[in-house]
Amino acid sequence: MREQYDFSKAVQGRFYRGHRPFQVTVNVSDSADHPRYEVFMAPDGKFSFRLTTDAAVLLTSDQEYDSKEACFSAIDQIRQAAILASTVLV
């Protein structure tokens, strides 16, 4: 069973990118809409997900997954990639 974390106040951690450690601190204000992943099943039995807040849909999956586990795996890959993603002005 996966642990559930309370991100309502702040998250601090030490992460490693390659062999170099770096600090990550995320502060969430009390008035912020908390994002959540919603997993749902289509009428044909396939699974999809979306990342939403109370105000908007931030992300939707562009494909359908055969199993719920495959859908959760895709969400985990997005979470891991987002930690290491850089911001680039194009």
Image (cartoon, rainbow, N blue to C red):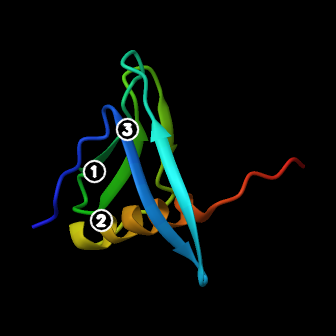
Image coords of residue 27 (percent x, y): 46, 34
Instruction: Give residue 34's position: percent from left, percent from top.
Output: 36, 30
Q: Which label's residue is closer to the chain start, 3 or 2?
A: 3
Q: Residue at x 43, y 22 (%)?
A: 29
Work out how far the residue at label 1 is from the one at label 3, CA to CA, in angstroms.
Answer: 25 Å
Please give the residue where the numbered disc 2 appears in the rendered image. 72
- Label 3: which secondary element: strand
Q: Are marks 2 and 1 in contact (CB under 8 Å)?
A: yes
Vertically, is 81 above or below 19?
above
The residue singled out by tag 1 in the image is 39
* Quarter-of-image position of residue 36: top left
Q: Which mark is residue 10?
A: 3
Three-letter amino acid code at the position of disc 1: Val
Question: From the viewer's perspective, is residue 43 above or below residue 69?
Answer: above
Q: Residue furthest top?
A: 31
Question: Mark 1 packing: few (<14 Cα in 10 Å), some, or many (20+)?
Answer: some
Residue 57, horizontal then vertical, whole percent: 47, 33
